[in-house]
Image: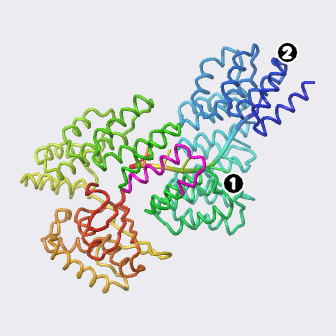
Amino acid sequence: MHHHLLQSLRFCATHRRPSDGKTLHAHIHKIGLDQYGALPNTLISIYAKCGLIKDALQLFDQMPHRDQVSWASILTAYNQSNLPNRALSVFAHSFFRDCLQPDHFIFASLLNSCAALNALQIGHQVHAQFVLSPFSSDDVVKSSLVDMYAKCGSVDVARAVFDTISSKNSISLTAMISGYARSGRKSEAIELLRSMKEANLFSWTALISGLIQSGHWVGAFHLFIAMRKEGIKIIDPFILSSVIGASANLAALELGKQVHCLVLGLGFESSLYVSNSLVDMYAKCSDIIAAKTAFNSIVRKDVVSWTSIIVGLAQHGKAKEALVLYNDMISTGLNPNEVTFVGLIYACSHVGLVDKGLELFKSMVEYYGLNPSLQHYTCLLDLFSRSGHLDEAENLLNTMPFDLDEAVWASLLSACKRHGKTQMGTRIADRLMGLGPKDPSTFILLSNAYAGASMWENVAKVRNLMATMDVKKEPAYSWVHLGKESQVFYAGEPSHPMKDQMSVLLKDLDDKMRKRGYVPDTSYVLHDMGKQEKENQLFWHSERLAVAYGLLKSVPGSVIRVVKNLRVCGDCHMVLKLICSIVGREIIVRDASRFHHFKDGRCSCSDFW
DNA sequence: ATAGGGTTAG
């Protein structure tokens, strides 16, 4: 009798049919078998698989005799419901009250929770108990350990455990590959994958996605192509969302479009992960229109869909639209998350809606019960700074519940310069000097702040400090996308075949700009040199080279899309505003922190970045 | 009953 019931229950679990499971449960309860043999434990795991954690827990609490199977089932239930912290706390509170010893199933579940929570300390403790237990040679638990250590960033410990696994299978290998890839150890990850007899889609996804997470975007694309060449069938959409993310990070619109085509060809356009990453990709590749189209085509939008488009609009300076969409989102009954508020406050600071931004911040904490992170405070700081509320900004910095880094103070210092607050600027500069600045752009700010207050001794101090510190500046470069071609330019005179034409064009533009009153702002050049030399430095900034090349080679009238690795300097920002109106072209620059849409002599960032 | 891969900020 109960054999038949068990089979029916298992069918409900594998086919995710919670209502049939509940009917069966009612029947089992009626005939008095709900505490019989394996039935209650099976019921728990069915409820877990169907996401009905409450029902699972109720059964678990009512069981008079819980065994190890019951415990393994409830721990798995919590893990599958994305509540790994509950799993650990329930275990810590009541497991030993049942007078049981953990078995290999329980160890594996606990390690799974630790991995999800990045809880290395607790993971260590579980590891120690496992080693002392009679199950210490279990390979499945060992592969959970590998995964836990890898996810917590202890890749070498993961490898040490991995080496003790007696028969390594594709699961333990994939966990190890993922660990290497996510911590950027590319060659070790590839070597392991190549050691597999038959690497499957899981292992390739672990490799490629991990490398994308650690910033190896181009390398990941080469591997993706290699995977396709080896004929690995893409039977689920996991890898696609990662690869779309890589296109977004590279701001490679053409590449992103090709992956989009692949998505359509394989029929994965209805995957929410995929469509959400497409929205983000188009926004990051500066095609905000395509991002909106991708967003509108999502049938069942979730928080991430809404957040992606809100953040995209905010970064493109379309603050009002972002706020309108937020209201639309709320009216569908969805709750915003932490990331949504980053986008919203960012949007408010863009259009000077100080009160609205503060109101949103308040609602995030008080109404939605979310914990503000450093990013939220940074957005608030930006909100105050842009609108000239510098005292509030400084007050905020002094009361923030975070350790403040150089970038946060530098941001306030830059606002002081913008709003002509010389005295406050020198006060902030003194603080920054005490912090031991490292970033080259901070030194420019410091030097300008002291120079603006005629404190020449301090200017000299900044320069001396910089000289002794041997500040390493990441070389500035920009690239321009022209259909299938993209061209990179480093700052300085280019050694490009089209150098002469570019030079002639830039000189011509320079003449026209000066007729409109342009005077180069040499305060953005840090090196000690004469005025003429400084102007010459600015003349060859990488974003100008990329724009010049774009103007020469692009289809007339088309939008010129440029990406820069660092932030656009203030002088170049002025220059690009002038150029776009002189040549009557739209220029979109994505720099290290935001998008600048230059059109008709203006920029979407409202001159604050 | 236990083990591996994916999206939004920075």
Q: How many marks?
A: 2
Q: Tell me if residue A422 comes above or below residue A73 in the rendering.
A: below
Q: Is disc 1 in the same subunit as disc 2?
A: yes
Q: Nearer the viewer, residue A362 or A395?
A: A362
Q: Nearer the viewer, residue A282 or A101?
A: A282
Residue A362's quadrant in the figure? top left
Q: Which residue shows up at 32% across the image and 43% down it?
A: A378
| Residue linked to disc 2 | A32
- Please tell me whether residue A305 belongs to the stretch shown in magenta: yes
Label 1: chain letter: A
Q: Quadrant of the C terminus of chain A?
A: bottom left
Q: Which mark identifies residue A124?
A: none
Main SS type for the magenta part?
A: helix
| Residue linked to disc 1 | A236
- Please tell me whether residue A127 belongs to the stretch shown in magenta: no
Q: Position of residue A396 (x, y in %)?
A: 26, 36
Q: Quadrant of the N terminus of chain A?
A: top right
Q: Local crowd at mark 2 within 10 Å, few (<14), some, or many (≥20)?
A: few
Q: CA distance from mark 1 to mark 2?
A: 42 Å
Secondary structure beneath disc 1? loop
Q: Amino acid at mark 1?
A: Asp
Q: Position of residue A51 (x, y in %)?
A: 68, 33
Which residues make up the magenta segment? A294-316
